Amino acid sequence: MKLCKLIPVIAAAATLCGCGGQHMEQYQMFAMDTYVTLSGYCDRKTLEDAGEEVRRLEGLWSVNIESSDIARLNRDGSAELSAETAGLMSFTLSMSERTGGALDPTIYPVLREWGFTTDEHHVPDDDTIAELLENVGWEKVTLDGRSASLPVGTAVDAGAVAKGYAADIIAERLKSGGVTAGIVDLGGNVLTFGQKPDGSDWKVSVRDPFGDGAAGTLSVGECSVVTSGSYERYFEQDGVRYHHIIDPATGRPADTGLESVTVIAGESKLCDALSTALFVMGEDRAFDLWRESDDFEMIMITSDKRLLISEGIADRFEPDSKKKDYSAEVIRR
């Protein structure tokens, strides 16, 4: 597979600048429960119009918007979906199958019980989790074209894929509108397209999940990257930290010895789906899936500060020399 190299940003805007006298315009907004930054060599109106498309997609997919396709499906048990939502659900279910259920949109009621979708955080008791898990299972979702249905007690949330799916749509919109180069950043879900006017790469940093600064830097070409990390959303109770990446098999935060997983691929939706799934799978199963695949690369940062880098991107990664407590290992096929 021909794959360019890209790694998640600490602050994408800080690394973007014009060159050769050409100005990169930027537009920022809040949507999909995150900060969105759209950047391109174009006029601001083009980016604002793309931002409105982000809001439209949010209106179709958010579980917290009562009129959305997803909310209607969860409320009524069946719904006729828009073309975009049907495509999102179809892709999500296909990735659930590919990852053996490590990605599962029906984990939504468990996420909600933990408070990760409501900000009313608490640790559910074992009986509550067991009861909710009876209705979890991606195979329970019926999707026939644009018609979807769920059994009683089952509900879905495509949030683990939605930002990546949206990024692909927005990038295509910008390119079709004549934007030759730019970056779509949906809360750290980053997609680059085209080439800077002087032909140079973008410089993007790998976030250090243990503190401030970067674990390293990569030179970036055209592709997409998404990171899932235990530091993104979490709460503490009785001195224990609980993060938002729930293992569908246990109904509890995934405990796999990983702090972050970054996936690099040609499509942002693939990155988004796999970053969550591989975090749940853990390093051994994640690298098994990578070795049998040809459509993505990845970087994993473990709890004991190892950087595990798949060989397809290793030549572009430059560790931060000040981070002496990290060790780096290139994983080969």
Image (spheres, rainbow, N blue to C red):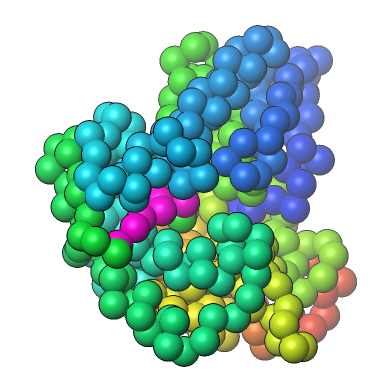
- The quarter of the displayed image where residue 203 is located: top right
- Outermost residue to the left: 144
Image position of 202 with respect to 316: above or below? above
Q: Main secondary structure of the magenta part?
A: loop
* Residue 174 drawn at (x, y percent): 52, 20
* Residue 12 drawn at (x, y percent): 72, 42
Say whether residue 93 is left or right of residue 56. left
Give the quadrant of the C terminus.
Answer: bottom left
- Which residue is at 34% across, 41% downward? 72
Question: How many numbered marks does the figure carry?
Answer: 0
Foreground pick, 94 / 40: 94
Q: Per the image, is 83 magenta?
A: no
Q: For residue 166, say whether it is visible.
A: no
In the rendered structure, which segment of residues is drawn in magenta?
Answer: 154-159
Foreground pick, 26 / 5: 26
- Which residue is at 34% across, 58% downward? 155
Image position of 109 with respect to 196: above or below? below
- Which residue is at 31% across, 70% downward? 136
Q: Per the image, is 156 magenta?
A: yes
Say whether residue 57 is left or right of residue 229. left
Say whether residue 297 is left or right of residue 235. left
Q: For residue 212, say whether it is visible.
A: yes
- Which residue is at 52% across, 86% downward? 125
Say whether residue 206 is left or right of residue 178. right
* Residue 89 drawn at (x, y percent): 29, 46
* Residue 330 drawn at (x, y percent): 54, 75
- The quarter of the displayed image where residue 211 is located: bottom right
Image position of 259 with respect to 89: above or below? below
